[in-house]
Structures are given as structure tokens and as C-alpha cells.
Amino acid sequence: MNAFTGGKPTVAEQRRMGGDPSICSVFQYFYFLFEEDDGKLAERESKCRAGEMLCGECKTELAERVVKFLKEHQKRREKARTIIDKFHLKR
């Protein structure tokens, strides 16, 4: 929750002046990794700039998506352990 964002120092300021997603590390994670839908990404950016969405909301949602991704990755990794020998080159 200590990630650098484009938010303002207080909630009131952010609601009034909005945030700046162009310098927000959390928004960059959504942009590059966790939001495939361009429409949803544009909506997130718009809400941020308008002060309708606070940084804490984005951080919480990103954390949930990262946890979901990691759990799925761990399941796949465990499944792969059972077949990995098929892909190793033997000498």
C-alpha cells in the first residue's frame, strides 16, 4: 500500500483535483499486465483524473488481481512438476 501513485496528498485534494495516472506505478501495472480491456483501462484513467477513484481503491484491486494471478500460477507450476521430465533433455 506504499506504492508511488499520481494521487494527491489528501483525499479531499484528490477528489477535487484528480490524480495523474501517467506517473502512477499502480496504473502502469494495470496498463501493462492486469487490464486487457482497453475500455475498462480508459474508464479507470478517466475516473482517476476526475477524482472519482482514489489510489487506495486501485491499490486494493491490483493486490487482489496479483494474488489471483499468483494462485493460478502456483497451481499450474504444481501441475507442471508432474510432466516436466518429458521436456528435459537427457544425456
Image: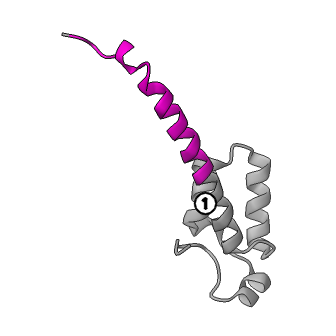
**Placement of 22 over or under 42, stated as above or below:** below
Residue 51 pos. (x, y %): 78, 76
Residue at 66%, 66% (x, y): give it.
60
For the residue pair 14 and 71, the one nearer the viewer reads as: 71
Residue span colored magenta:
67-90
**In this figure, which colouring scheme has been used for the structure?**
one colour
Residue 59 image point, x, y percent: 63, 67
Q: Residue furthest top?
A: 91
Residue shown at 42% from the left, 26% from the top:
81
x and y percent of residue 85 in the render?
A: 35, 17
> Is disc 1 surrounded by few (<14), some (14 to 19) or many (20+) residues within 10 Å?
some
Q: Would residue 88 appear left or right of 51 to someone viewing this image?
A: left
Q: Is residue 52 above or below residue 73?
A: below
Residue 54 image point, x, y percent: 72, 75
Give 49 or 4, whichever is nearer the viewer: 4
The residue to which callout 1 is attached is 63
Which residue does the image show at 74% across and 44% down from the upper left? 37
Question: In the image, is residue 43 above or below residue 23?
Answer: above
- Magenta segment: does it hold 81? yes
Residue extending furthest left?
91
Image quadrant in which the C terminus is located: top left
Magenta segment: does it hold 9?
Answer: no
For mark 1, give the secondary structure: helix
Which image quarter is the N terminus in? bottom right
Q: How many marks can you see?
A: 1
Instruction: Say what amino acid the circle numbered 1 marks.
Output: Ala
Residue located 62% across and 88% down the image: 9
From the viewer's perspective, is 81 left or right of 70?
Answer: left
- Main SS, magenta residues: helix
